[in-house]
Image (cartoon, rainbow, N blue to C red):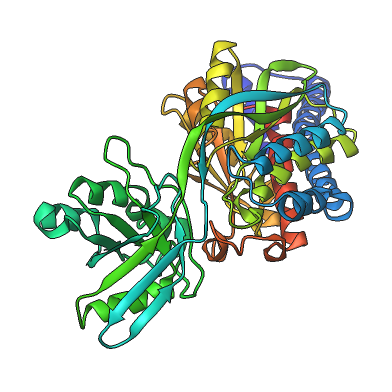
Amino acid sequence: MSSLILIPINYLCKRGLKFSSNFLSITMKRIIFTGFSLIFYVFGLFAQQNDIKDDDAFFIRSIYDKALTEGQCYNWLEHLTTRIGGRLAGSPQAAAAVEYTRQMLDTLGLDSVWLEPCMVPHWVRGDQEQVRIINSGTAGTIDLKALALGNSIGTAPGGLVAEVVEVKSLDEVDKLGRAGIEGKIVFYNRPMDPTQIRTFNAYGGAVDQRVNGPARASRYGAVATLVRSMTTKLDDVPHTGVTVFNDDPPIPALAISTNDAELLSSLLKKERLKVYIFTNCRKLEDKLSYSVVGEWTGAEFPEEIILVGGHLDSWDIGGGAHDDGAGCVHAMEVLQLLKRLAYRPKRTIRCVLFMNEENGLAGGLSYAAASNKKGEFHLAAIESDAGGFTPRGFSVDGDDLIFNQKFKKVIEWFPLLEAYNLSFNKGGSGADISPLKSQKGLLFGFRPDSQRYFDYHHTAADNMDAVNKRELELGAAAITSLVYLIDKYGL
């Protein structure tokens, strides 16, 4: 403080000016008064900022308290998974899920709830699949646990029998060519990398076998494919999922459990094997379905939309609890919690439950097309599609032209969320919201702990008993907290 006072006095004296003691006394008092006023003003600004942060911290705490004591997401998920069950697009269960979630959103006092139409593929699994090693010289005849992959076709009524050739990659199929592939069953057996800490990275490094492997084998005349299930776990549970043929002729394509993949591989090292396959899955005509949308209009910036969503469809063989019933009830809970807290949003908050993420993305594409046609702007879109496990944070994506500037705003909120073990990282968001990237808002992917996700992903085990109520509620609170911060401060 003294240096601030001495600088102007010393400066004036050096300029040859002289002051009486009375003048200096009055001047010093004025300078001291001004100095203290400036300090109090600056401290006041800091205090005001701290008050704002304190207000945010208290409100986020209230979000968590409300989620853990008055949340509805667990009850909604129980209905989706247990009373409705697997909700593959085009199925009666998918239609029931649309109606149920529409009714639930209608009870929340939103400004509008509607159904966004989309034409979805209609694939049906049919009878129980059969995959059998026949007449092994060392093991005899062994049934393998298997599930047909989405978009696969069935065999002839009597099934098919062919020799098996094992490969680790699509490139290996290309090298074998028609001479090594034609008339055979191609067995893809590249495990997910267990050294990857984030299991989604391991999944991304192996899933090309399932998505594109059958088409590549078909190109060289394979009669069917078997694919190792996408999980790091060794068990007897097969994992389904989509496969894509595009212009290649569709063939029967099935996943087998990891234990059976290990068995088949070990036997192939000793002898040539033939396998019997039967499935009568088939693809029917596309069907009209809907994504479910609920909207709460903002009071100050209604044209800026904050979307939170998940995908309503799931595979047919389980309850679709983690994939992605959890994401849907997370999104619904955001609105429910903010309503219970008497919050009034500045921006429009929109819950979207997308149809047909699993085998077509029709809901996400149709929603984005309709939004673009209306000239809408999604300031932010948040998708929960990684399960209902313990929250770890959010990955953030966006158009290169705007990402760095907007991401700087997001990381300012880290101190408010780190108390809840949440962080922000650059990375992908979600399949359903990815078509909104062109609107130049930020896209967020909710990221819970991923270690157990692929134990259940696309399996008959993805049911309500795999979900921990508290973990699910913590996820809803985390997403609601992010929505609150985006709504209050913008990007």
Of residues 127 and 236, the one nearer the viewer is 127
Left or right: 276 with respect to 419?
A: left
Q: Position of residue 431 (x, y in %)?
A: 50, 38
- Quadrant containing the N terminus in the rendered view: top right
Q: Residue 108: percent from the left, percent from the top?
A: 86, 33
Residue lying at the far front in this picture: please name it: 158
Q: Does residue 187 appear in this view?
A: yes
What count of labels does the image hold? 0
- Residue drawn at x 62%, y 48% is 324
204 horizontally vs 452: left or right: left
Q: Is residue 360 visible?
A: no
190 w.r.t. 122: above or below: below
* Image point (28%, 35%), residue name: 247
Q: Quadrant of residue 341?
A: top right
Name the quarter where the C terminus is drawn: top right
Determine whether, in the image, residue 263 is placed left or right of residue 39: left
* Residue 119 position by quadrant: top right
Quarter of the view holding residue 274: bottom left
Q: Residue furthest bottom?
A: 138
Query: Which residue is at the far left?
Result: 179
Residue at 57% over, 62% down: 456
* Residue 422 shown left or right of residue 135 in the figure: right
The spot of residue 436 in percent (x, y) is: 52, 26
Residue 406 is situated, as x and y percent measured from the top left of the image, at 54, 30
Q: Residue at x 42, y 75 (%)?
A: 143
| Residue in the foreground of this view, choosing between 158 and 426 | 158
